[in-house]
Image (cartoon, rainbow, N blue to C red):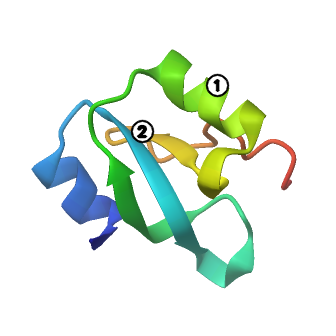
Amino acid sequence: MRLTCEEMAIKYPNQWLGLKNPIYMNNDGVTLLSAEIVYTDKTCDELLEMQIDGKDGITGWYTTDNSLQLGMAGVV
């Protein structure tokens, strides 16, 4: 299911999400507009491990902080 950042924060407040197929503002790779929610039950560490392993293109995102997140530093 694809949600905007605002929808993610409302539906999953203060929670780490595993996202796939993100859409960014101006394709900047940092300012997330929306994404498909893949995981709602993983910790930050679990999502980081998935990103490092390259598992399914998963990106970890914390719903109440719209700043640079795990896996984004290589994009900037």
Against 60, is 44 above or below? above
Dot 1 and dot 2 residues touching (CB under 8 Å)? no
* Number of marks: 2
Which residue corresponds to the image point at 87% horizontal and 46% vertical from the top-left?
A: 74
Against 63, is 42 above or below? above
Q: Nearer the viewer, residue 44 or 4?
A: 44
Give the secondary structure at mark 2. loop
Residue 49: mark: 1
Q: Nearer the viewer, residue 72 or 55?
A: 55
Q: Residue 60: horizontal and vertical position, in percent? A: 52, 40
Residue situated furthest bottom in the rendering: 26
Q: Residue 41: horizontal and vertical position, in percent? A: 27, 32
Give the secondary structure at mark 1. helix
Circle 2 is placed at which residue position? Answer: 65
Residue situated furthest left in the rendering: 11
Three-letter amino acid code of the residue under disc 2: Asp
Against 73, is 48 above or below? above
Is 38 on the left-hand or right-hand side of 13?
right
Q: Residue 57: horizontal and vertical position, in percent? A: 65, 56
Alpha-carbon span between mark 1 and mark 2? 20 Å
Residue 58: mark: none
Q: Residue 22: horizontal and vertical position, in percent? A: 54, 69
> Could you tell me which quadrant the N terminus lies in?
bottom left
